[in-house]
Image (cartoon, rainbow, N blue to C red):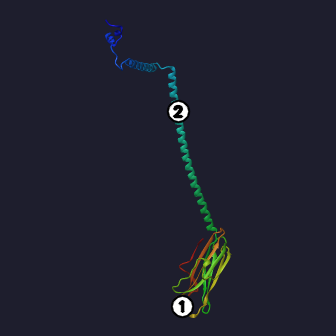
Amino acid sequence: MHSDNDKDSPNNERNTGEPELSLGEGPEPQHENTQATDEESKHSEIKSKIIKAFKKPSITDWFIAIATIAICATSYLQWQSIHGQLNEMKSQTIAMRGTANTSRVATELAKQSIDAAQKQVQLDQRAWMGVVSVDGQVEAGKKIKAIVHFKNIGKTPARRVQFVITEEELPERGKPDFILNSKSLKRERHKSTMLIAPQQEFTATITGEDVLTDSMLKSLKIGGKKAYVHGLLTYDDIFDRHHWLTYCFFLNINDSRYTAYEKYNDTGTY
């Protein structure tokens, strides 16, 4: 006989024929199967909806599709129009730049032409001072005398005319002591300031330092000595431009006239 306590014992449970459950076992496999089934159902539902949407498009879908195509076409046409306008504006800008450069070049050329015309007018109308000739007086017992003839061959007056003249008697190979700057002349002989009208002449006379003796006169004739006259003349024209003239001559004893020296005969503008 068994007691009631024996019925409730673990041995009694074994005898019932029910399987024993080990640790870790339970209803979890059933839960995983349920989740897999739910996911498959969801995928099937989404798939069926997609198929249904493609199989039976609604009027709204067709309207949206057509509207989208129309918007795309309109946007493309607008882009083409804007692109064409941009290209046209770019071409116009390039053309305007070319026109501006052409105008700048034309303006510069016109300015150069005006400047050239003004210079030509000034050259044509300005005063031009020059040396016409130099005469000499050579006699024994007297000092050498040199007479320089200046003339304004221009069309307008020469203003503030100033000149310096020097006479030198040098050995045959001697060179004249020519100084261009009137402020530092070492042997100043004559200096004046005047106004010379167009085509007007004036003379400047200078005499040597020593009285000519027969031996000195003979030395000049055979070429042992040479007599020079040289100087500097400055003047302004009516356009307020300052000009200079240099001259240098040596005495030809045979005809008592002076001949232009190889150097120092020039003119220019400061």
Closer to us: 217 or 240: 240
**Rounded to the nearest whole Å, what is the CA distance between mark 1 and mark 2?**
110 Å
The mark found on residue 170 in the picture is: none
Closer to us: 166 or 3: 3
- Label 1 vs 2, first from the N-terminus: 2
Residue 87 image point, x, y percent: 53, 41
Outermost residue on the bottom side: it is 214
Residue 21 image point, x, y percent: 34, 16
The residue indicated by pointer 1 is 219
Label 1 amino acid? Ser
Residue occupying the point 60% across, 76% down: 181
Image height of 154 relative to 29, above or below:
below
Image height of 82 relative to 138, above or below:
above
Residue 166 image point, x, y percent: 60, 82
Closer to us: 200 or 143: 143
- Give the secondary structure at mark 1: helix
Residue 45 image point, x, y percent: 43, 19
